[in-house]
């Protein structure tokens, strides 16, 4: 059963109420309030904004002696809420209950407006009873301001690796709120274990600069005297401006250098479904890390898996505690699923976008691990015939760019993934370009059915083509309208997998299509990092390995920037790469030109000398250095990773901007 809560709208954005009601620090106060109300003879609920069903599901209103539910909006009359028919709030005068629960924050005015209707002797209870402290609010005048709930969850682990060493996690981001004028920003951090218990809380004050932010599980275990931890880190940013989203890169690494991977932030809004979970190969184990995002348990039989396009769903027969973490082996529910099949996740809005971890075994031992994330599967889309019609003005229109890593060292694989419940077909083609933007070849997948899982190894497509043997290029997935028998919706996604030929180490990432670099706009595309479309500028965060590759055996940072174009744009980009130290100071910068429709693959050590890297490796008050990639002439798309000095291990994921 899905939770009846509103988390996100592609029109309105995120809804702050579920964050306010379900905040880990609010949960104990809310549970105490509900327990107190449950001991009363009877209560009435006044629900002027429609919050009651969501709050009831988060905190279990089944045991409350609810006698009446009152509403303000006449269109809400006649509905059933919490088992009661809704009544006009004017009926309140003729009712007698022990208490009236007013489902509102900042409730003084709301209560004042109905005070003349409330019978004498009725205790008035409002959600202001469970407010966060004033010093934890960004906007103290309006509690449900989205900026008051700039929060996110992060997978967080520091645990044995099964080989005698340990696995670690590292969060990396920057104080990007500073550029919007924020000062005195603080991160309020809560470490939550597998059972959902908060085992540590602390504040991290950020410098009044665009300084780096680094949170390493090894350091946090030392802070709290922990031998190990597996669970979640809840991040709440206070004092922010411009963005109510906490964005970060998450590195997973180990004492064994073969354990090196990275993934993106969790996406702060729980969804009904997630797509793009790959089934394992014969020597692989796929673990889906389910991390409950709410103060209520996930009952057994709620989380389910099915092959994409197959309605036969197998359900997890185990509960997950409030804010708890559960590692689901995909083979436990789907033992016959095998790569390149892909799995759909039924989540019921119980958790934010989860990570998955793939363990590769050789000779009975785990040889490599890698992490990635699934994506939100939309439930609100329908095919739009106009997408095909705008091609005469938008050129390639929606396209999804991804690297083709140098073929002498890496294999590059693409797997289109349905990412909306209404996508019954995907007419998809892939175009391959060298670094200058010259098209090398193209391939049509045909019109894929929802149940089809067709992985394209670019070795098969580029057999005998030497253009990309030593240099990186890129591929673009786009709609193939020549084979389409029905409309498309613009929500084209794919998983991209990369394998090191010598070591077998792998990394993967997934993302969706956008319109890039056109003067015309269509339904908010091309997207912008700030402001309205068209988003013809770039501001990307390139996190770096903390060592900055100062020593010859240190890991290096690599990046691939792609200059995708839906229609012809400027012949060259004007891309600034600004190397910052941990305090946010620029210690070195360079400018590169990327060919229109082309790409640029580089390592940090190739662009910045050892002296600059050493200076940038100096930690600031909150973390280590990074690179800001800025371009005001075009919209670039980027992928980043960390690679060992010998290339045997690497990580890769798409970058984020702000």
Image (tube, rainbow, N blue to C red):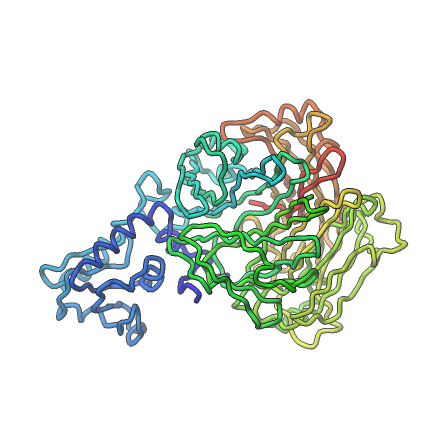
> Residue 608 falls in which quadrant of the image?
top right
Q: Is residue 191 visible?
A: yes
Q: Is residue 367 shown left or right of residue 271?
A: right
Residue 206, compared with residue 467, is above or below; it is above
Q: Quadrant of the N terminus?
A: bottom left
Q: Nearer the viewer, residue 373 or 181?
A: 373
Residue 592, compared with residue 497, is above or below; it is above
> Residue 369 falls in which quadrant of the image?
top right
Q: Is residue 467 shown left or right of residue 416?
A: right
Q: Residue furthest front?
A: 364
Q: Quadrant of the C terminus?
A: top right
Q: Is residue 518 visible?
A: no
Q: Position of residue 136 (x, y in %)?
A: 35, 40
For image coordinates 56% across by 51% down, the residue present is 355
Q: Position of residue 41 (x, y in %)?
A: 15, 63
Residue 646, compared with residue 392, is above or below; it is above
How many marks on residues? 0
Q: Position of residue 292 (x, y in %)?
A: 45, 53
For image coordinates 60% across by 63% down, the residue present is 334
Q: Position of residue 545 (x, y in %)?
A: 63, 33
Residue 381, compared with residue 497, is above or below; it is below
Q: Nearer the viewer, residue 307 or 21?
A: 307
Q: Residue furthest left?
A: 120
């Amino acid at each position: 059963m899905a939770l009846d809560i509103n988390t996100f709208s592609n029109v309105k954005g995120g809804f702050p109420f579920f964050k306010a009601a379900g905040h880990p620090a609010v949960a104990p106060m809310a549970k105490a309030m509900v327990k107190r109300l449950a001991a009363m003879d009877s209560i009435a609920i006044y629900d002027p904004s429609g919050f009651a069903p969501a709050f009831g599901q988060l905190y279990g209103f089944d045991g409350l002696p609810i006698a009446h539910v009152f509403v303000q909006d006449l269109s809400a009359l006649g509905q059933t809420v919490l088992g009661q028919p809704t009544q006009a709030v004017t009926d309140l005068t003729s009712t007698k209950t022990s208490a009236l629960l007013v489902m509102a924050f900042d409730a003084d005015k709301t209560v004042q407006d109905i005070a003349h209707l409330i019978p004498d002797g009725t205790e008035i209870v409002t959600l202001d009873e469970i407010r966060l402290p004033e010093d934890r609010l960004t906007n103290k005048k309006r509690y449900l301001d989205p900026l008051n709930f700039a929060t996110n969850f992060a997978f967080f682990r520091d645990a044995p690796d099964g080989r005698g060493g340990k696995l670690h996690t590292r969060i990396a981001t920057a104080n990007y709120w500073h550029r919007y004028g924020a000062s005195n920003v603080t991160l309020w951090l809560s470490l939550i274990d597998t059972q959902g218990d908060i085992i540590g809380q602390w504040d991290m004050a950020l410098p009044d600069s665009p300084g780096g932010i680094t949170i390493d599980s090894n350091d946090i275990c030392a802070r709290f005297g922990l031998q190990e931890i597996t669970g979640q880190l809840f991040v709440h940013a206070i004092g922010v401006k411009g963005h109510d989203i906490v964005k970060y890169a998450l590195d997973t690494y180990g004492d064994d250098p073969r354990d090196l991977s990275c993934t993106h932030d969790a996406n702060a809004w729980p969804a009904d479904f997630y797509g793009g979970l790959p089934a394992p190969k014969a020597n692989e184990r796929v673990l889906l890390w389910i991390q409950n995002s709410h103060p209520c348990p996930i009952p057994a039989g709620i989380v389910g898996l099915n092959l994409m396009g197959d309605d036969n769903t197998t359900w997890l027969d185990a509960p997950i505690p409030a804010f708890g973490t559960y590692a689901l082996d995909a083979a436990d529910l789907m033992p016959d699923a095998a790569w390149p099949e892909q799995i759909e996740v039924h989540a019921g809005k119980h958790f934010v976008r989860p990570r998955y971890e793939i363990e590769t075994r050789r000779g009975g031992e785990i040889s490599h691990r890698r992490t990635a994330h699934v994506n939100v599967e939309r439930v609100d889309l329908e095919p739009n015939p106009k997408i095909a019609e705008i091609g005469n003005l938008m050129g390639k229109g929606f396209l999804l760019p991804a690297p083709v890593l140098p073929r002498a060292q890496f294999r590059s694989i693409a797997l289109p993934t349905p990412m909306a419940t209404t996508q019954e077909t995907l007419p998809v083609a892939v175009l391959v370009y060298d670094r200058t933007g010259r098209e090398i070849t193209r391939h049509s997948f045909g019109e894929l059915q929802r149940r089809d899982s067709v992985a394209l190894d670019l070795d098969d497509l580029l057999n005998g083509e030497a253009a990309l043997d030593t240099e990186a290029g890129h591929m673009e997935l786009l709609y193939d309208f020549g084979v389409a028998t029905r409309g498309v919706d613009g929500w084209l996604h794919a998983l991209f997998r990369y394998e090191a030929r010598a070591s077998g180490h792998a990394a993967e990432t997934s993302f969706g299509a956008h319109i890039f670099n056109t003067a015309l706009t269509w339904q908010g595309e091309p997207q912008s990092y700030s402001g309205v479309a068209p988003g013809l500028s770039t501001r990307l965060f390139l996190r770096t390995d903390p060592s900055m590759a100062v020593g010859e055996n240190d890991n290096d940072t690599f990046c691939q920037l792609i200059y995708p174009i839906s229609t012809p744009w400027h012949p060259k980009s004007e891309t600034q790469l600004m190397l910052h130290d941990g305090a946010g100071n620029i210690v070195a910068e360079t400018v590169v030109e990327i060919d229109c429709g082309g790409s640029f693959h580089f390592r940090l050590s190739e662009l910045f000398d050892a002296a600059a890297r050493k200076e940038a490796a100096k930690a600031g008050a909150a973390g280590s250095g990074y690179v800001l990639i800025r371009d005001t002439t075009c919209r670039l798309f980027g992928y980043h990773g960390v690679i060992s000095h010998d290339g045997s291990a690497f990580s890769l994921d798409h970058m984020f901007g702000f």
